[in-house]
């Protein structure tokens, strides 16, 4: 898996034509997706090993959780949330163009701020989910993110405001993953590895779709539209998640 990721990146860097660049990205994405799902599943197994030894189902029935409408609903919410999150991220340069003016250094700086914020969000969201409940964290984060995305066009033109927006949206954007996975696993602990893999599949599908949906928005309404459009999807995910009920919710 890591070899595929490395090979895909190498092909992208060395490819002399655009089709080969795209091919390299496909190979790299496949390697990254397989590694992420496998690593996450392995972590779930290690953390929950005593429980899995006691409750694990036969291999042939591990997909049984998909018959649970709560699981299907959470996977749908994952797709919708990540679609909304990645529409502005995939088209980051278009969204922030009024501030960067096409300057690569400014764009790189904003992406760095976003990435640092994303790391903070990833590291902290699991702690908050343990304390306040995964569903509550998901709803709070997505509602806050909708506010930031809606305000994004109004913050353009000011570099400090854009930096603040990139930092906050980075924290919030990556504050969904851990709580969503936790909520899924609590629904069917014995199928944790399968559920985490399905979560990653839903997320990566949303990432792929965000490029197409965002491109249509940019073409029709301009780069300033991707923030509000992303807000529509994350707010819908918040509503769906809040409407869901589980006996394991806190």
Image: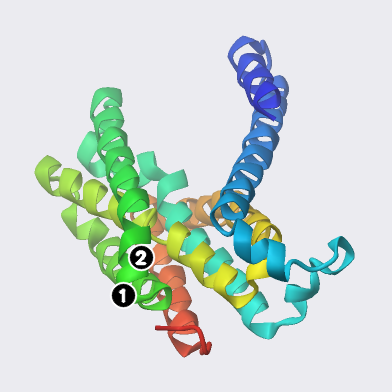
Residue beneath disc 2: 228
Where is the C terminus found, in terms of image quarters?
Answer: bottom left
Q: Please indicate whether residue 184 sits to the left or right of residue 171 in the image.
A: right
**What is the x, y in percent for residue 141?**
33, 68
| Residue drawn 48% across the image and 57% down it | 217
Q: Is residue 209 visible?
A: no
Where is the N terminus found, in terms of image quarters?
Answer: top right
Would you place residue 80 above or below residue 175 in this image? below
Nearer to the camera, 214 or 112: 112
Q: Please indicate whether residue 213 sits to the left or right of residue 235 in the image.
A: right
Nearer to the camera, 207 or 230: 207
Q: Residues within 10 Å of mark 1 (few under 14, many from 20)?
A: few
**What is the x, y in percent for residue 227?**
35, 59
Helix or strand or loop: what does disc 2 sit on? helix
Q: Please indicate whether residue 195 sits to the left or right of residue 186 in the image.
A: right
| Residue drawn 46% across the image and 62% down it | 84
Residue beneath disc 1: 132
| Residue 159 image-quadrant placement | top left
Would you place residue 113 above or below residue 241 in this image? above
Helix or strand or loop: what does disc 1 sit on? helix
Would you place residue 82 above or below residue 106 in this image? below
Q: Is residue 74 visible?
A: yes
**Foreground label between 2 and 1:** 1
Could you tell which of marks 2 and 1 lies nearer the N-terminus?
A: 1
**What is the x, y in percent for residue 193?**
67, 57
Nearer to the camera, 120 or 88: 120
| Residue 52 image-quadrant placement | bottom right
Q: Tell me how far mark 2 sits from mark 1, CA to CA.
A: 28 Å
| Residue drawn 28% across the image and 39% down it | 116
Would you place residue 250 above or below residue 116 in this image? below
**What is the x, y in percent for residue 237?**
47, 74
Q: Residues within 10 Å of mark 2 (few under 14, many from 20)?
A: many
């Amino acid at each position: 898996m890591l070899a595929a990721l490395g090979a895909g990146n190498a092909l992208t860097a060395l490819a002399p034509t655009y089709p080969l660049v795209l091919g390299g990205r496909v190979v790299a994405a496949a390697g990254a997706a397989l590694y992420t799902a496998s690593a996450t599943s392995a972590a779930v197994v290690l953390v929950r090993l005593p429980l899995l030894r006691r409750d694990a189902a036969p291999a042939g029935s591990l997909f049984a959780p998909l018959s649970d409408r709560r699981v299907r609903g959470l996977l749908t919410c994952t797709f919708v949330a990540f679609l909304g999150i990645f529409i502005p991220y995939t088209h980051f340069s278009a969204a922030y163009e009024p501030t960067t003016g096409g300057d690569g250094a400014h764009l790189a700086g904003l992406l760095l701020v976003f990435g640092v914020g994303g790391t903070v969000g990833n590291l902290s969201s699991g702690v908050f989910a343990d304390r306040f409940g995964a569903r509550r964290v998901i709803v709070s984060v997505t509602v806050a993110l909708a506010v930031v995305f809606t305000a994004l066009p109004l913050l353009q033109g000011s570099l400090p405001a854009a930096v603040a927006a990139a930092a906050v949206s980075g924290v919030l954007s990556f504050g969904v993953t851990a709580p969503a996975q936790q909520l899924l696993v609590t629904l069917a602990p014995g199928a944790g590895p399968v559920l985490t893999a399905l979560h990653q599949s839903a997320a990566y599908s949303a990432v792929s779709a965000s490029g197409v949906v965002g491109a249509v928005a940019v073409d029709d309404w301009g780069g300033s539209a991707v923030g509000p459009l992303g807000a529509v999807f994350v707010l819908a995910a918040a509503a769906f998640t809040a409407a869901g009920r589980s006996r394991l919710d806190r």
